[in-house]
Amino acid sequence: MKLLALTRFGPEGGSSRVRFYEYAPWLAQAGIQFEFQALLSPRYLQQLYATKTRSLPELLEDYLKRAKHLISASQYDIWWIEKELWPYAPYFLEKCFTRKSPVKIYDYDDAVFHTYDRSPSAITRTVLGRKIDQVMGAADIVFAGNTYIGARAIAAGAAQVELLPSVVDLSRYPLVKRAGPSVQKPDNRPIIGWVGSPSTRIELTSISSTLERIVKRTNCRFVTVGDGGTTLLFDGHESKSWTYEGEVAQLHDFDIGIMPLRDLEFQRGKCGYKLIQYMACSKPVVASPVGVNCQIVKHGINGYLASTEKEWESRLVELLDDVKLRRQIGINGRATIETEYSFQVTGPKVAQLMFDAVKLRKESAPRNLSRSR
């Protein structure tokens, strides 16, 4: 079986890496031949993060490259597509290129439909408001990162909807027993940590004053990884650069992982990947009770859910004051990842779903019967 994975970014893009590229070993193990084809070049993402601007000529060039690639991609059994073939392109273009395509699997880890139907632009809402629903309705399978996205796919009339959370490879997140202070924490002060990107840093603003109070009143540090570090939230906030190679070590250095989220429609479509990473490193978590967070976090067992500033402060201080509690909740979190949120669980499932989809397509294809004369 041959698979073409049509991602938005290369492995440097977080969602593309987690939802597609990191499945490579599992696809290979299942005997699936695969090719990854990213829509946007690495320089696009670099420019976006550095200047928050986009080069229209380069974007058009990338769009044309994908069109040319698809025209000669009939040899594949499956197209595994990240969200849509071309962002902000009308549905009829998507339909033209997928009408006679092989099995189509669309993958969503964000409520990307709200980018269109909740856009401040009336033109975007009018032209693209139903695009993702139309894409989902024409898919053979929709991989939905959570139930919020899955419900939208069902309502759109998708033929098959499979819940597929964003997960981690347990072999990349080994269990670590700390015998003493780490190199990064020479004074052994506990760290409240957050990992993300410049675009998701805004989620921290809702609890920044709470974090500032806790840092001033307790013997702890607040460290962010990957937020860009251009402006610190308060005196005592430490911002560190993110690298794929160093990410897991940085997460292991946290003592508590946090994931605040505003209760907005787009945020309800998030897949809680931060929480999954923290838990894979056996870290207790505190998160906003928004969307999939409520499913990942079992309150009081593998972490805490906090709505108000008072609840955030209470839960964080409780964990900072009790090393044994942190350790036990961290152990429980790791167990959650091992049984529900790892490639070791989802890898074989994804491969089997793909084989089943191709088999079904072949069995339902019309056959040319020879006529006797």
Image (cartoon, rainbow, N blue to C red):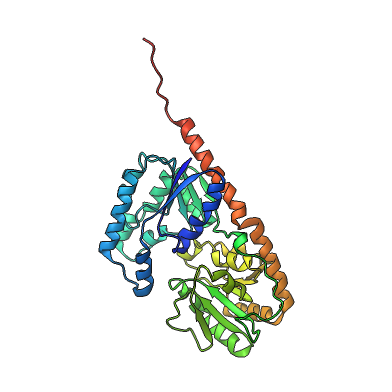
Residue at the spot 70% in from the left edge and 82% down from the top edge: 321
Q: Nearer the viewer, residue 268 or 74?
A: 74
Give coordinates of residue 97: x percent, y percent: 33, 45
Q: Residue most toward the top?
A: 373
Q: Which of 199 and 254 is in front in this view?
A: 254
Residue 103 falls in image quadrant: top left
- Asked if 202 appears above or below 15 in the picture, the reply is below
Q: Residue most toward the right?
A: 324
Give coordinates of residue 121: x percent, y percent: 31, 64
Task: Confirm whether residue 171 shows in the render.
Answer: yes
- Asked if 31 appears above or below 270 in the picture, the reply is above
Give coordinates of residue 10: x percent, y percent: 42, 59
Give coordinates of residue 19: x percent, y percent: 50, 56
- Residue 14 lies left or right of residue 303; in this view the side is left
Task: Confirm whether residue 305 shows in the render.
Answer: no
Residue at the spot 55% in from the left edge and 80% down from the top edge: 223
Q: Which of 145 and 118 is in front in this view?
A: 145
Q: Nearer the viewer, residue 136 or 65?
A: 65
Q: Name the quadrant of the C terminus.
A: top left
